[in-house]
Image (spheres, rainbow, N blue to C red):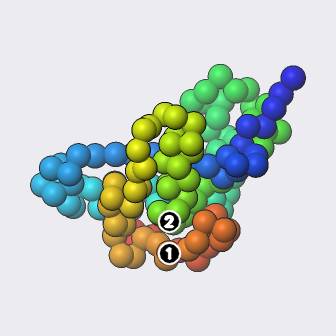
């Protein structure tokens, strides 16, 4: 039996993220901004062409090409909206994984100005965002 766990309350739930320390971000702003731009370019690439993901799955996972061609892929957001991340923190609180409310906005670094346009979580995962070449 297979079950799609990314439905209902967990639909489009973020399942991965990146973190750094405050000290590193303050000491290395160019590296952090470059990393953010690279991630956003990759998100845009796969949001606009899911075949890229399907082609890579057999290389980096134990999913064969035939299965990769048929699976339902998640979304690849091209914006960083605090409400999307807050859902994770709220679910952690609801299910007792943390004991106090977490304000996810406190942990988000702003993206370089030209990497995205803010969009609400109800907006499409893709959009007209522009990522500068660097």
Q: Do the residues labelled 2 and 1 touch (CB within 8 Å)?
A: yes
Residue pushed farthest left? 27
User: Which corner quadrant holds the C terminus?
Assistant: bottom left
Q: Where is residue 20 in the image (x, y as percent from the top left)?
A: 28, 46
- Upstream in the sequence, badge 2 or badge 1? 2
Q: Residues within 10 Å of mark 2 (few under 14, many from 20)?
A: some
Query: Residue 68's image quarter?
Result: top right
Element class at badge 2:
loop
Residues 111 and 68: in front is: 111
Query: Residue 57's image quarter?
Result: top right
Question: How far apart in space, not on screen, are marks 2 and 1 (Cα)?
Answer: 7 Å
Circle 1 residue:
118
Reply above or below: 72 against 121.
above
Residue at the image position 58 percent from the left and 77 percent from the top = 128
Element class at badge 1:
loop
Reply above or below: 39 against 3.
below
Q: Where is residue 76 in the image (x, y as percent from the top left)?
A: 60, 55
Residues 113 and 70: in front is: 113
Residues 15 and 83: in front is: 83
Residue at the image position 42 percent from the left and 70 percent from the top = 115
Give left or right: position of 25 versus 109: left
Circle 2 residue:
81
Residue at the image position 56 percent from the left and 74 percent from the top = 119
Query: Residue 34's image quarter?
Result: bottom left
The answer, for residue 52, to whether it is visible in the render is no
């Amino acid at each position: 039996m297979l079950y799609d766990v990314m439905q209902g309350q967990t639909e489009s739930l973020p399942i991965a993220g990146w973190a750094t320390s405050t000290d590193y971000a303050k000491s290395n702003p160019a590296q952090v901004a470059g990393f953010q731009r690279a991630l956003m370019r990759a998100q845009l690439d796969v949001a606009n062409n899911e075949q890229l993901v399907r082609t890579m799955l057999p290389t980096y996972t134990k999913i064969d090409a035939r299965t990769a061609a048929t699976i339902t892929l998640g979304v690849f957001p091209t914006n960083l909206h605090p409400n999307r991340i807050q859902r994770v923190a709220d679910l952690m609180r609801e299910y007792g994984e943390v004991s106090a409310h977490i304000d996810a906005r406190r942990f988000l670094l702003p993206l370089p100005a030209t990497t995205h346009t803010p969009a609400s979580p109800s907006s499409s995962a893709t959009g007209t965002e522009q990522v500068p070449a660097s």
